Image (cartoon, coloured by chain):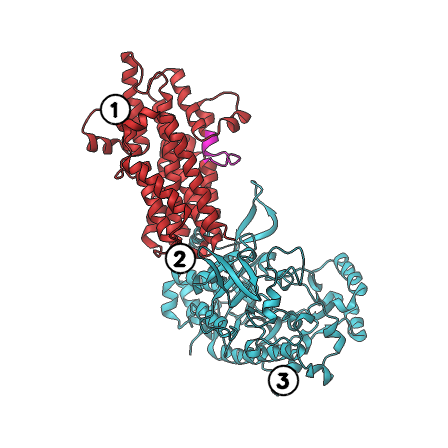
Chain colours: A cyan, B red
Amino acid sequence: MQKFDEMYTKLPYEFFSKGEQIRDHYKIYDEWLARQPGDMMAKRREEAEMIFRRVGITFAVYGEKDESGAGTERLIPFDLIPRIIPAHEWSSMEKGLVQRVNALNRFIHDIYHDQEILKAGHIPREQIEHNAQFRPEMVGVDVPNNIYSQISGIDIVRAPDAQGNGEYYVLEDNLRVPSGVSYMLEDRKMMMRLFPDLFSAHRVAPVAHYPDLLLETLRASSPETTDEPTVVVLTPGMYNSAYFEHAFLAQQMGVELVEGQDLFVKDKFVYMRTTRGPKRVDVIYRRVDDDYLDPSVFRPSSTLGCEGLIEAYRAGHVAICNAVGTGIADDKSIYPYVPKMIEFYLGEKPILNNVPTYMCRNKDDLAYTMANLKDLVVKEVHGAGGYGMLVGPASTTAEIEDFRKAVLANPSGYIAQPTLSLSSCPTFVESGIAPRHIDLRPYVLSGKTVQMVPGGLTRVALKEGSLVVNSSQGGGTKDTWILEA
Amino acid sequence: MLSRTADHLFWMSRYTERAENTARMLDVNYQTSLLPQSDAVALMGWQGLLSISELTGAYGKQYDTVNARDVMDFMVKDESNPSSIVSCLGAARENARAVRGALTTEVWETQNQTWLEVKRMIKSSEFEADPSQFFEWVKFRSHLSRGVTVGTMLMDEALHFMRLGTFLERSDNTARLVDVKFHAVQSDFYGAANERDQEYDFYHWSAILRSVSAFEVYRKVYRDVIRPERVAELLILRPDMPRSLHASLNEVVNNLALVGSNPDSETLRRAGKLRAELKYGRIDEILATGLHAYLTQFLDRVNDLGAHISREYLVAA
């Protein structure tokens, strides 16, 4: 399989003289690296870990306990070598992201209103209406600005095309509660602290204004019941794996971090309990899944949400960001239709590529998938976090056969894609600097306009050869540099 | 601010203050135990320490005898004891973590760092190697925590609830300390009759003063030999002694007034009444009614204040 590395034009690293094989936008970094003493990286890594621990930048690992029986808090592994993207590549990616997110928001609005795209026959109706992510509660509900996904995390990978050049592909859209943006911000802070000299040698586009853009976006999503909207962040609580991020964003925006128990609904308005009595809430940036938002509508046993919230929402008295029901657009079974959505709603050609996808619900696609399991990546359409997937080339025969049974038992629950050779980036691992696979998640904000900070979160699969970058599966993160021209 | 946030802030400060006062009490007992003294006196010190913290029963379930090493282990590093220093620091940090967004970065990092360090110190047996240094460290982390709070937090409700927690806890802890130390002198309030024990008395009273950093303060205020009734006066009634009941209640009342918007607040009325009694009280009156009885009802009223604060502000309807 052809390989593409972000920094070097040849692989593996040991077999060539690096100075000659370096991509242009990495040249300054490479020269800098060559000047550093041998133990510098190890020292800096220790320093970074110490700081992360003190600052408490951790995520909880579900199901793991430490000796005292408490849940474990793990540091997110942070890699010291930045992932660098030249300005011209980013500006085209940014246009593609704006286009894609606009189309996705149009799609969600359409699905919960006139369903033009179904009437035009571009997507089979049963694929929407029988989809667990379709929320009948949202049919006919109007949301401010017709925006459903205020915060969209679009996962992008790079793989070699036929000529061996790097080409960007959207791997999946995350329109429910995409997480990780705090790591993007903390990684940058850490890099600037550890390597100030690198920042004076490069023109790296800043990202620290993200919370500002986020607050602007959330305020723009307020219902028209007020001019001075009160925004809150709703968290499931401190034992949630992304709690650090919830607290971090609330603090950076200067808004309250609330739990379900802090909210109540009266006369279809939402209030929070404060030391000075109830205070009305206008915009809820929720980091709680749909299912847990309101026990009177969704899971009755949920204590994470607030009773009556959906009623207040449907009355237009409170904004929930992202909206309820966005899952219909980021479901893996809907993903193959996104290029079609762009053409249908915007009348434009898609700027960003989709990965070719086989929908096992189709007979031909299923047959192809079954015949080529060992070469494909197969994913559960509702899976997330790197769970419920098969990476054919990296799996044993037994694993493949188990998956075959699962797919055959429920074909419409799966899609398959060719195993992309995700691009690699030099990464500082135990054995020194070695190539590891990466992806990129830009965070696209849709309020009055669509905007984003340059870059996003680069995730890296720290295990040699692994293609799974999720933090729950041993993935790490890298600072992402968009070099200004 | 959110009631739940206020609750976490309040308890974060209470636990930090409690850890500090536990360290102070343990340290003074440990220092005293280095002096030549009878086994009976030493034993009394450790027993008193357990009873002051209402832990005699919990301790008895784990240990057969009362001795310095076991009591210190129990009070410092036993995570099953919710009042141990490590438990208090852990609880303070958990409360901070729950509302880290309401704290400045410095305040949060101080709490987090304290917790990480205490775990490391317990693991590496640094406490056993030098208990006094460990207690000193706990005290200084608490000083740091208060200082960083006052030095960096916006002066709004969040700060007032934290201060409220600190001083309510301190008034409780100082009252307990005075109670047990005066109680420990068995014969009479003024100490024992024979001369040897009078010498012991000096160390006893000076140890109490040192445990609340008041030895030099006493000398400065009274310019006289150490006499028990003055020790009591200093720790109960002096408004300028930072760890006295009066000074603590002053802060409780001030901060309550700052968080409350309700002029008819029952919490504020009760706090104000308790403060007034300290302000206009006299030590001879208190001693005449009996110090122990006085402190017992004081502790009840502090406890009642805590319940009112909780009902009025922290668990809002």
Whether residue A135 is visible to the viewer of this picture, yes or no, is no
User: Looking at the rendering, in which quadrant would you find the N terminus of chain A?
Assistant: bottom right
Single out the residue that lies furthest toward the front.
Answer: B264
Are discs 2 and 1 both within one chain? no
Q: Is residue A413 left or right of residue A96?
A: right
- Secondary structure state at the residue bearing disc 1: loop
Quick one: label 1, few (<14), some, or many (20+) residues within 10 Å?
A: some
Query: Is A67 or A448 nearer to us in this picture?
Result: A448
Q: Is residue B198 left or right of residue A175?
A: left
Query: Is A128 or A76 nearer to us in this picture?
Result: A128
Query: Is A179 or A206 nearer to us in this picture?
Result: A179
Q: Identify the disc placed on residue A154.
A: none
Q: Amino acid at mark 1?
A: Arg
Quick one: label 3, few (<14), some, or many (20+) residues within 10 Å?
A: some
Q: Identify whether A55 is placed above or below A27.
A: above
Magenta stretch bounds:
B73-84
Q: Identify whether A165 is placed above or below A298.
A: below
Kindly indicate whether the residue at mark 1 contacts the one at mark 2 (C-beta within 8 angstroms): no
What residue is shown at x 72% (from left), y 70% (from top)?
A131
Estimate the spatial distance between the alpha carbons at disc 3 and disc 2, rounded to whole Å: 55 Å
Q: Amino acid at mark 3?
A: Tyr
Identify residue for label 3: A345
Q: Quadrant of residue A99?
A: bottom right
Quick one: label 2, few (<14), some, or many (20+) residues within 10 Å?
A: few
Query: Is A473 or A448 nearer to us in this picture?
Result: A448
| Residue B275: % across, % down | 33, 40
| Residue A175: % across, % down | 60, 70
First along the sequence among labels 3 and 2: 2
What residue is shown at x 78% (from left), y 74% (from top)?
A362
Q: Amino acid at mark 2?
A: Pro
